[in-house]
Amino acid sequence: MRNSSFLRLPAIALLSALLAFAVAPASLAESEDIPDGLAEAAAEYLVLWGVMQGDENGNLNLDKGMTRAELAVFLTRLDAISYSTTIGGLSQWEEALREYFAVPEKRVSAFVDLPAWALPYIEYCYDDLMQGVSADRFDPQASVSPKMACATLLRYGLNTKGGDGFDGWDYDDSIETARDMGWLPENGLGGATITRGEMAILTERGFAYRATTVDCSVPPTMSLEEMRNGVLQRVNAARENEGLPELKMLPELNESAQLKAQDLLDNNYFAHESPTYGSPAEMVWSLVPRTRGFGVGENIALGQSTPQTVMSAWMGSTGHRANILHEAYAYIGIGAVHGPNGGTRWVQQFAVGPV
């Protein structure tokens, strides 16, 4: 069970930690079974908060099958994001988890086949998210089937139907339910084992669905100007700490960023490529003509309710941080739109100067 006595950190909305992208994600391992770039894009926000991590060489192995032990780690970290606002906070949370279940009396299962590295995660997920293959065996190295992956995410509570626990979903209808909700890759789940890339896609789309159906953030109490100034102040404080010049807010770039934030809401997507305006460069060059031919960057985020929380998310990500601290950028535009069902869309657009 997810032991409530263990959860020590204050809870925040899950989407406020997970959904954020940088304009140019790092090159990640590709899956042969799903369209190019789809798994990479989905994995990016999971990497952002440490839910997915690479091997000793930094490879995410998105085409590798997921094991039951890895699924337990994955689910535990997803849940932990609700109790931690930074990557450092997640690391501390995991360390506390390991210490907690290192005490034999704290264990809730009778499994005898758990590897030491996976034991705290499996114990955390036991009973309401995952069960064993028998009373004393978990079979941690067994593969995760597509049915198991879909059902587990549904039971975890990514959808409003059913809720947490084992009431409401079963293996027999989990794939069809996930398909009906638009979670599956366009070519489906073809193998007997879910891959790490497919799991990333399922999770990303589950959160995107939740963002449009569940009120998951506190409505903003600040004006747009206050939100912009709050982000700008934190951007320039971070740049000052690195010995970099301040960014100037460009009115035309603000308008472009605001249109992009509105477009994210109106067209119900979360990506840098806009169905209305094209790529970030195409959009900025069109709306801010004096930037044409100069470098352009973009950060987007979904769900954070304040400048402080969105900047914490961006600065915790290598890609976002690199945009904020890029020495060539001189100008910034900031947009923010709050959706009617919760979830603020945030956009930063950057331009190289002088323009």
Image (cartoon, rainbow, N blue to C red):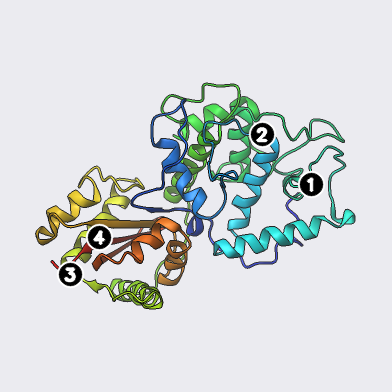
As measured in the structure, the alpha-carbon distance from the residue carrying label 3 to the one carrying label 1 is 55 Å
Cα distance in 3D space between marks 3 and 4: 10 Å
Taking the spot 85% from the left edge, 40% from the top edge, the residue there is 111
Q: Look at mark 2 in the image and give the residue it sits on.
A: 67
Q: Position of residue 314 (x, y in %)?
A: 42, 62
Q: Is residue 219 left or right of residue 294?
A: right
Of marks 2 and 1, which one's residue comes earlier in the chain?
2
Residue 83 appears in the picture as rendered? no
Looking at the picture, which amino acid does disc 3 mark? Pro
Q: Is residue 119 left or right of residue 317?
A: right
Hey, what amino acid is under mark 2? Thr
Can you identify the residue that label 3 sits on?
Answer: 251
Q: Which mark is residue 257?
A: 4
Q: Of label 3 and label 1, which has the lower sequence position?
A: 1
Within 10 angstroms of label 2, few (less than 14), some, or many (20 or more) residues?
many
Query: Residue 151, percent across and down?
Result: 62, 34
Q: Earlier in the sequence, mark 4 or mark 1?
A: 1
Label 2's element?
loop
